[in-house]
């Protein structure tokens, strides 16, 4: 590794912000990248002050000037990729611009505000062959990657059923009315998109099915519901899907399940066995086969059973619990290695993490579910990638 | 308690039978009832031999003669109630006859082969005011009853969502082809009814919603699926329900989830909190409130927090794990106390367990789900009790 | 099985009694034995009334007359074995008399009040070749038996360390002062013996080491402590043992660990792997090998991996939780099969459960620990069996 | 925060090294400190190369020159504190020198090679009033800190018993013979000290008692054992302690418990309740009170029940699992805030983490345990701080 990568960040500054700090930790975690450029808030003065306060090398008043200015810098100074941690309505702009400027992109999910935006962005990304990662953070837990590898190796046989879930409880009452910043934009269609619960977390659950089982939804029946009075978007999201191989998929997300934290997970059921994972015990992967003892795979770089493509994402020996920040750092790691490989550096052969296509498919899924929900649960086809 | 109750049993004998022995254990558990009359197998000679071998006081060749003969005996000799542990197609006959003969009935679930039978049976039972318990065994775990009492006390506020599940894996391959007796009748429409997975275990899951939350399904969308080739009935059963108060209900049952044993459970979500229970940790009930520590209620007769109506169903101090047989014995206990109370004996004020109405509602739910499943998941209304 | 066994019971009647009812359930559980004779309370009139009320065939005023009278009955009427569920000081008398009368004995633990009594009883039992089971109930959970079989098969290699524990919290305050019956006799040296916590539950923990690992304590260092003021016996019991093969043993029992219910368990550590079991998840046995996935063995008669000698103790298919009563019933089952085998009946080849030698070794262990505790933890040799 | 702190690191470079990378992640995690100076390996050329490769601002050939040279730099350039991640024999030198040079110190545990070294270091640290943190990393998990605060608030009443444990399995066979670097120095008395297992992990377990319960060992009985043939130090370490208030302490550590990862934890038992924590579920703290539901406190910055002094150590909302790196970062955070506070910066009022006294007490505990172990477990007094 000859030099650290230079990272730009859009959003993620200011009080009450949540995701900026975790992404900064993720960028810094492996001592292989630095906080170079920041357009961290929507007001220009605040953005510049924030960048200074957070020790970014260069601060900008908005993302447009950041990308434009950086693009003009000599190659040995300008940023290598942009991390986008704004609300959903502000993903498309910087992502599209960064791609056009030849920079890599790590974008928060859901990919964009609308499916149309997503399709447009995909076109740009394909044209520019942009290194692109979508922050489906939970796919970046090593035992989720291991599940994927086991499915791909045929360990489960043919997949019959995929269950994915993501219950939360934090929006069970109307906290947006009290000015909670994280809640405010998530329940606002103009900033969040067509679905509240589905877009914010249902899409994470759906990604488990795509990432681990390698299947996609062909059509869906959805029950979207707003339990908290006066809220404009759904806060509960229950979907039945027919998957691409005919398997059953269920995607259950909720923001009103009091007591649930971020309890996402999945169960993939095949003709030869079942795999189960939950973030509540995220360093363990359960494997069931008929008539056999249950097997628990556990995180730990020293375990011979960990797939070679997963090991590069594990940082410490077994028993030292890794968690959310490491998963986030794995997203950055994946993008970083893609960028370094293009420059001829040697990087590990590592499990690929979700990219632009996954982002678009997530948007298509949400769009179909919203439509089905609006029409009392009739089957709606999910638009495939062309 | 002046004397033991006298119990008759229909079915439950012969090699390969499963449920006869647990019910006999349940009847004998509290030393308050005895195995008096048995018509334990479908062939008369075998039935009589079986009764003798199992130490029943009197053996009969078939249930019709058992009920007829017992009814002729003087009141101080004849059986007080009949336990029916036959396959589903053989529930209606003995249940109806026993009710007409003035005996109590404890009947396995689902109540009958068809909804029509169920409605007819209900008519008889109402006419004769028959003490009647349906073996929704999992409602008879004390912490499930406690959940019910907490919901009824308003602990959860208004109910928003009820999730119930019952995955199993034992039918993931075609074991009925190898003559496994329990499998054989369960996959046979003539003996099992219109639904395999739904009737056998989906109905258990649905009962959690009715019993604990006090809600019923108004209409359902169902995905019923037969994964194992050549099987005549569904082995997977996924239902979305609109509940009587508008709440969302999900009922997920499966017989192909390799690794799942009998992992039923539920989560009831209200405006003020959530209750969660699973048979995998059945002596614990979890209670969540916003911003509060999670509370775990644990089984134990000595705990002051156990509702008074539940305590009579608890047999040992905390830490001595009770399980399936005790739950089954609680069903018999409930019926026994009903019968004793009618005779003027003093019995505890105890949580009522599922009766004839619950049995009928279970059948109506299955009927609606089967219809919806057949019609690609369109909404189908669930016939209410009149 | 040509007839039910006839069982006599000593103790176990009267209000506030705990262990009588569970043993009656255990005796009746498999429909293979009946409650024939009872001397259930210490006052003769109460004893006879209690036997009647509990539907025993014959009631007696005291155990001496019960054993004497039963012994005079013809062989086809008299009791086959005696179950002793009195406080510790009242074990020796009926056990010794029953053995001399040619009856089998199932005796609660610890075996007797003193080691001398235990040695004397052993002599009688050996002379009369008495079928004898000591109620180390936790050894009778099937997955504990399975652990034993795995150790005996060499699965763990050479044993290095055995950890056994049994914390409870119910005596954390002076409930005996409020007349709690179970507490009262357990803290009274005249009825309980030289150790309170050690005798009541430390001995259960020690038995795990003997039963599962097949090792015994050669010498011990003990910390016995009385935390509750004014209590005459220890309510906390911490022992370090040198085991017969040089392995380390730790036995930790407590009655003041608030929150612990009956949370006994063990971990057996060998050169090739580790086995772990806890009653809090008693239907699961954990097996660890270096560098391998953890394996969870689960209860279920249908599992091919369950040892043949353990299967006869399993009553239901996987997922139907068994518990305390079934374990207790396994103790009776073991004794029953021993008795039936002697009569020429065919019985399963089943894992042997603790007998008279185990009872004596438990008493020797307690005696050594009490002496060490009194002498500030110096090493004290544990008297071996001759 | 006007500027980042400047950190020096001693050790932690080179292939096979474990602890360097985690500490670098911890230093960088909060974007408040930078890797300024490094003396990362024992060979000078390698050390300088390593510092360059790892993007340290300045590399040095050895710690002595690093501290000497840095001390000469102007205050606005030189390092603020030194992180020492060498094997135990190489703690004293750089720690002592850094303290004398007026720098802060974060030192790995155990504090030094010998108790004498520890006492000498303490003298220096006291003289220079050095900001000092010892890396008892597990005390820096927020729920461990919360346990401490609850104990200090009197929630448990008077403490009766403290149990602490730390089993591992990685040294169950002689991996040091295969050149495993982490194993090699840990089993070498010249680099590790008088105890292998006790010094490496027993001291972590003991610190739970000191940190959470605020008690220390007055005297100990120890069983130290070397199971793997040809190993020079103990690989199993079992200690009974009499604590400063008369309570019982047990400290059980092992390196041969196959299957255990780093499964440390504790249970603190008082007259009013019990607290229990284990790293295997480290974001949860269990609280038991007699007759009450169990309470589970869970990590999450938004929970009102989290003590004010603990909140500054929590980085993300509930449900985003934090782990080992965050705990390590909390150690650095504690030291950083101490240093910043001395400079007049405003810092949070935060739970203090282990310092020089705790390091010395850990060494005194090990010394006493080693002596007791050598003398067959006789009681040995633990030298108190003066």
Image (cartoon, coloured by chain):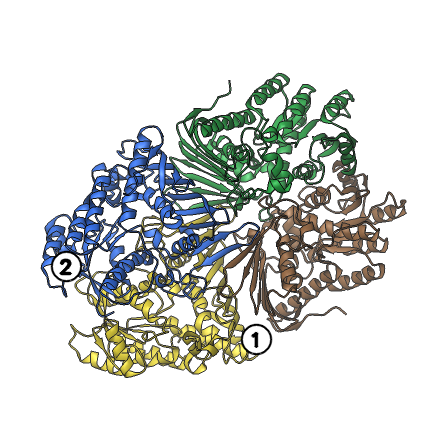
Chain colours: A brown, B yellow, C blue, D green
- Compared to residue A351, the image places residue C165 above or below, namely above
- Compared to residue A279, the image places residue B37 above or below, namely below
On the same chain: label 1 and label 2?
no
Percent of width and height locating residue A63? 81, 48
Residue displayed at 74% across by 68% down = A385
CA gap between label 1 and label 2 equals 60 Å
- Given contact means CB atoms under 8 Å apart, are the residues at marks 1 and 2 in contact? no
Quadrant showing the N terminus of chain C: bottom left
Q: Is residue A216 visible?
A: yes
Q: Which chain is indicated by disc 2?
A: C
Quadrant showing the C terminus of chain C: top left
Is B289 left, or right, of D79 in this rendering? left
Q: Which of A116 and C169 is in front in this view?
A: C169
Q: Can residue C114 be seen in this view?
A: no
Is A158 left, or right, of C158 in this rendering? right
Q: Is mark 2 on a helix, strand or loop?
A: helix
* Residue A22 figure quarter: top right
Q: Is mark 1 on a helix, strand or loop?
A: loop
Q: Which chain is indicated by disc 1?
A: B
Quickly name the residue at label 1: B377
Quickly name the residue at label 2: C52
Is D132 left, or right, of D229 in this rendering? right
Image disc number at residue D261: none
Q: Which of B236 and A190 is in front in this view?
A: B236
């Amino acid at each position: 590794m000859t030099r650290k990568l230079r990272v730009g960040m859009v959003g993620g500054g200011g009080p009450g912000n949540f995701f900026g700090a975790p992404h900064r930790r993720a960028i810094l975690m492996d001592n292989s990248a630095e906080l170079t450029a920041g357009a961290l808030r929507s007001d220009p003065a605040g953005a510049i002050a924030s960048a200074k306060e957070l020790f970014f090398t260069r601060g900008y008043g908005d993302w447009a000037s950041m990308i434009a200015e950086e693009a003009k810098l000599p190659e040995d100074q300008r940023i290598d990729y942009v991390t986008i941690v704004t609300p959903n309505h502000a993903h498309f702009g910087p992502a599209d611009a960064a791609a056009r400027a030849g920079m890599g992109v790590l974008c928060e999910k859901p990919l964009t505000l609308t499916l149309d935006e997503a399709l447009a962005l995909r076109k740009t990304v394909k044209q520019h062959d942009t290194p692109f990662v979508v922050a489906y953070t939970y796919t970046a837990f090593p035992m989720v990657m291991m599940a994927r590898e086991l499915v791909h190796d045929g360990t489960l046989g043919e997949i019959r059923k995929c269950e994915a879930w993501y219950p939360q409880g934090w929006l069970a009452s109307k906290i947006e009315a009290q000015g909670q910043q994280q809640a405010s934009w998530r329940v606002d269609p103009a900033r969040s998109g067509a679905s509240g619960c589905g877009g914010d977390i249902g899409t994470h659950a759906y990604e488990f099915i795509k990432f681990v089982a390698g299947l996609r939804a062909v059509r869906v029946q959805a029950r979207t519901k707003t339990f908290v009075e006066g809220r404009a978007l759904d806060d509960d999201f229950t979907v039945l899907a027919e998957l691409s191989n005919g398997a059953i998929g269920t995607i259950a997300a909720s923001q009103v399940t009091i007591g649930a934290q971020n309890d996402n997970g999945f169960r993939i059921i095949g003709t030869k066995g079942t795999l189960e994972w939950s973030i509540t015990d995220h360093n363990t992967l359960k494997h069931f086969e008929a008539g056999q003892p249950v097997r628990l795979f556990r995180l730990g770089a020293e375990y011979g059973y960990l797939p070679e493509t997963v090991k590069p994402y594990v940082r410490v020996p077994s028993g030292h619990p890794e968690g959310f920040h490491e998963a986030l750092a794995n997203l950055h790691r994946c993008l970083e290695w893609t960028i370094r490989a293009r420059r001829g550096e040697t990087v590990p052969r590592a499990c690929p993490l979700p990219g632009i296509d996954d982002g678009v498919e997530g948007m298509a899924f949400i769009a179909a579910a919203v439509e089905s929900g609006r029409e009392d649960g009739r089957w709606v086809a999910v638009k495939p990638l062309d």
